[in-house]
């Protein structure tokens, strides 16, 4: 492609038409906006040579674009443009490739945008077609055009306007066609429909999902604003205009002059502080822009731009720090915003990138937690942070004071702390021992009363426990602390027996009693929260369980006499639920902290230490580090057998976990042997109907399927699903997993309709408890592709296959086997569609 790198550096001939003149102006304007304001006059003097009129025109447009950036925004498609003269060339009615250009909807330095339609063999599709004017384009603009097309090609997400086609016209002009978005900017959409705060938050979470997807694919948008975030009539968000986006990875897509630090195209009212300063741009820049947009969506006002403010004034406001909380400017909606939503917005708008949310997913998760009534992760600035800022502002004086005070207090503090910890541990041990003695005595009396010689019949354990609950409620009413301890003990036992509903009711009653006791009951609250959280986790209610575990952990940390053992158990519980929710990095850190506490206290030969090793191994394995996972599982199993014997349910848990790792490493005979041993132990110690049996049945069923024993796998799947009901609620993870197994079995037996039914039901169940970008949901959708392809429903299968494959490839959790199967599935789908060239884009991964 022959392009003059400096099309505006010579005086235009007198024969230039208005359209040609405008092309030169718009191309030079695009270059001028790349130059710092202070250097722009010198740049234009050189670029325009003796053409004073051209220089003045571009300089005037550049100043106007800085002072009133929104003046040149488009409305219909979110395309950045400066409107050309009315008599400029309009190609409406002509053809570009297979597309008929119906009307021009925008134009700018990178070319024109048309609404177009494609009509072939009865097929009609409306698109937005971007057509570049090569003759008037600078080398920089050409590269931006090509980069935008490459970026769009890598992004396939339901909330991002999709690239459909691209190529060259007969005259050699590059173009690309993308999804035509018929909608409104998100701020206008919310206002026109008078949406409530909850509805606005739900809508904005779609934006967060789209931005997170772009970030996972190494793309920073750099221009998030209402004109680039549209909402269609059905409420679907569409992210538009990647014209100034940045690719984060090095390589041919990453043009140095397009992505380097320094001045770059931007919209000042929505730009991050680092964009305005010309600093290095990271994903944190998009988080700031999301914060500005969220502020507008919730409060109906811009956080930094007053009416009539110039871009310079906006810049000063942004760099001055976070704005007033949105609740203070939102009018009648301010009460709802006050508190957590204020904190969410202001966290995204922090001046320092490292103090913002770590990613768009974290921002979206806090919005989800607010909507569900759970504590958000972000917190207002603490006293410690403010003190640290003061010290940094007054380094010399603060250092002198701190050195003097530190020398005085260090020795005293160490002595006091050691004494206090020792006394606290001793007092807590005495108190817990006394309470344990009372609880044990009470339960012994209950079992003695259940002597079959007195009752005249055998009495079950559950009958004894039910009787104990009634008696504790009656006889221990005057001793609420002991009553709560008995309720907690029985609740934990019921949970172990798989009686989740009864356990939850009893543990919540215990918590109520302890809360009423105030300071007297406070030490026992975290342990009861942990037991309740485990019940919820066992039922698949991961979000609620996580909230309880975090609350319990916070109480342990805040205690003046921390319970090391209790804190380690809370860390185990939290790490386990984080692993299930797919937050693997945090889960690993939490499990390692729990193990460190146990090693520090010398608790390295106990069932709890074995459980911690197994929990860490699960997280490590889900990140694909199977060799390390096997080592940790074997160590955990060794400790469990040494402390519990060879026929304990917790030993079976360790066997089950190790068998799964061996299965991933293709050691199928060893894995099958361990599954069989685990099943025998659990059947003997827990009974055939216990919920823990389902974990082994499910995993063993998957192993049988993977090794070609399809009929046996189907039999185990039916056995698990038979248990749905009181002992295995639908929210239990094994229900969805077994439905997926049932779907795979049906596919292998050429029953795609039955497979689709099972897979869609599994997807529905998982969507109730897992975040939208969880790899298990992506895997579920990816397998569903086979059911759709088996019925010839390619139009439904293709977008589902592409999106789920991209999520699986970007996620940290899925194993090599999962990724390989996803690639194989795409490859087979395109071959079935008769499109071998596209099948080649997804070659089956090698083992």
Image (tube, rainbow, N blue to C red):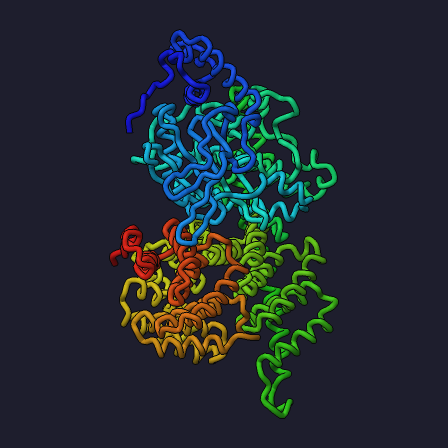
Which residue is at the front of the view, 695 or 472? 695
Residue extending farthest to the front is 93
Above or below, 245 against 336 in this view is: above
Which residue is at the front of the view, 813 or 835? 835
The residue at the point 56 percent across, 65 percent down is 535
- Residue 501 x, y percent position in the rendering: 61, 70
- Residue 774 x, y percent position in the rendering: 46, 54
Above or below, 403 against 9 in this view is: below
Q: Quadrant of the C terminus?
A: bottom left
Q: Quadrant of the N terminus?
A: top left
Residue 31 in the figure: left or right of residue 171 = right
The image quarter containing residue 798 is bottom left
- Residue 163 x, y percent position in the rendering: 41, 43
The residue at the point 51 percent across, 54 percent down is 771
The residue at the point 63 percent across, 69 percent down is 486
The residue at the point 61 percent across, 64 percent down is 434
The image quarter containing residue 495 is bottom right
Using the rendered image of the protein, determine whether residue 600 is visible from the camera's viewpoint. Answer: no
Residue 791 in the figure: left or right of residue 665 = right
- Number of marks in the image? 0
Residue extending farthest to the left is 846
Which residue is at the front of the view, 569 or 160? 160
Above or below, 834 against 55 in this view is: below
Residue 306 in the figure: left or right of residue 95 = right
Using the rendered image of the protein, determine whether residue 454 is visible from the camera's viewpoint. Answer: yes
- Residue 570 x, y percent position in the rendering: 52, 56
């Amino acid at each position: 492609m022959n392009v003059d790198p400096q099309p505006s550096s010579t005086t235009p001939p007198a024969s230039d038409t208005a359209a040609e003149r405008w092309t030169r102006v718009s191309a030079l304007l695009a270059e001028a906006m790349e130059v710092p304001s202070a250097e722009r006059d010198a740049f234009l003097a050189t670029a325009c040579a003796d053409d004073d009129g051209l220089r003045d025109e571009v300089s005037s447009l550049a100043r106007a674009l800085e002072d009133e950036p929104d003046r040149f925004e488009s409305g219909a498609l979110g395309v950045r443009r400066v409107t050309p003269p009315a008599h400029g060339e309009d190609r409406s009615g002509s053809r570009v490739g297979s597309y008929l250009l119906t009307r021009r909807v925008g134009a700018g330095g990178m070319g024109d945008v048309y609404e177009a339609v494609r009509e072939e063999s009865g097929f009609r599709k409306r698109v937005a077609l971007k057509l570049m004017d090569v003759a008037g384009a600078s080398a920089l603009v050409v590269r931006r055009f090509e980069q935008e097309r490459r970026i769009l090609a890598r992004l396939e997400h339901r909330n991002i306007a999709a690239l459909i086609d691209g190529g060259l016209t007969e005259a050699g002009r590059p173009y690309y066609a993308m999804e035509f978005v018929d909608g409104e900017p998100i701020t206008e959409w919310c206002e026109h429909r008078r949406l409530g705060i909850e509805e606005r938050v739900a809508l904005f979470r779609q934006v967060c999902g789209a931005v997170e997807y772009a970030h996972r694919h190494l793309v920073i948008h750099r221009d998030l604003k209402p004109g680039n975030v549209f909402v269609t009539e059905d409420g679907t968000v569409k992210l538009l205009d990647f014209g100034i986006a940045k690719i984060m990875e090095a390589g041919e897509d990453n043009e140095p002059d397009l992505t380097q630090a320094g001045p770059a195209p931007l919209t000042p009212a929505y730009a991050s502080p680092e964009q305005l300063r010309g600093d290095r741009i990271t994903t944190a820049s998009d988080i700031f822009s999301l914060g500005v947009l969220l502020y507008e969506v919730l409060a109906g006002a811009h956080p930094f731009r007053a009416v009539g403010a110039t871009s310079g004034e906006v810049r000063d406001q942004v760099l001055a720090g976070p704005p007033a909380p949105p609740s203070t400017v939102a009018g009648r909606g301010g009460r709802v915003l006050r508190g957590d939503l204020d904190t969410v917005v202001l966290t995204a708008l922090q001046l320092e990138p490292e103090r913002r949310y770590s990613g768009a997913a974290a921002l979206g998760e806090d919005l989800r937690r607010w909507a569900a009534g759970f504590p958000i992760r972000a917190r207002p600035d603490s006293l410690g942070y403010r003190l640290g800022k003061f010290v940094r502002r007054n380094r010399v004086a603060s250092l002198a004071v701190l050195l003097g005070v530190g020398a005085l207090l260090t020795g005293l503090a160490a002595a006091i702390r050691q004494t206090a910890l020792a006394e606290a541990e001793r007092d807590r041990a005495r108190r817990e021992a006394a309470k344990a003695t009372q609880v044990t005595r009470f339960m012994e009396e209950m079992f003695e009363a259940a002597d079959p010689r007195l009752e005249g019949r055998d009495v079950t354990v559950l009958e004894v426990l039910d009787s104990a609950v009634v008696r504790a409620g009656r006889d221990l009413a005057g001793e609420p602390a002991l009553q709560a301890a008995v309720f907690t003990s029985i609740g934990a036992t019921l949970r172990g027996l798989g009686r989740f509903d009864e356990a939850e009711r009893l543990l919540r009653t215990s918590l109520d009693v302890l809360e009423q006791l105030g300071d007297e009951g406070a030490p026992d609250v975290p342990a009861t929260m942990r037991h309740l959280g485990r019940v919820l986790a066992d039922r698949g209610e991961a979000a609620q369980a996580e909230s309880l575990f975090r609350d319990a952990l916070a109480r342990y940390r805040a205690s003046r006499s921390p319970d090391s053992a209790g804190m380690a158990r809370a860390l185990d519980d939290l790490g386990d639920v984080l692993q299930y929710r797919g937050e693997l990095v945090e889960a690993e850190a939490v499990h390692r902290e729990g193990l460190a506490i146990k090693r520090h206290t010398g608790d390295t030969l106990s069932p709890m230490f074995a459980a911690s090793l197994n929990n860490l191994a699960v997280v490590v394995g889900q990140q694909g580090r199977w060799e390390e996972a096997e080592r940790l599982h074997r160590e955990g199993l060794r400790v469990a057998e040494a402390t519990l014997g060879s026929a304990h349910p917790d030993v079976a848990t360790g066997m089950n976990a190790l068998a799964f790792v061996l299965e991933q490493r293709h050691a199928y005979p060893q894995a099958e042997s361990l599954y069989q041993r685990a099943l025998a132990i659990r059947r003997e110690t827990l009974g055939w109907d216990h919920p823990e049996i389902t974990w082994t049945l499910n995993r063993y069923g998957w192993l049988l399927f993977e090794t070609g024993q399809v009929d046996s796998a189907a039999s185990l799947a039916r056995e698990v699903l038979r248990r749905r009901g009181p002992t295995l609620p639908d929210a239990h993870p094994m229900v969805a997993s077994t439905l997926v197994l049932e779907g795979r079995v049906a596919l292998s037996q050429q029953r795609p309709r039955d497979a689709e039914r099972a897979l869609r039901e599994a997807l529905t169940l998982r969507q109730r408890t897992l975040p939208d970008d969880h790899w298990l949901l992506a895997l579920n959708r990816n397998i569903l592709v086979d059911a759709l392809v088996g019925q010839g429903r390619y139009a439904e299968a293709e977008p589902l296959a592409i999106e789920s494959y991209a999520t699986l490839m970007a996620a940290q959790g899925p194993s090599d086997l999962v990724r390989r199967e996803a690639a194989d599935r795409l490859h087979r789908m395109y071959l079935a569609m008769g499109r071998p060239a596209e099948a080649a884009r997804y070659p089956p991964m090698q083992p």
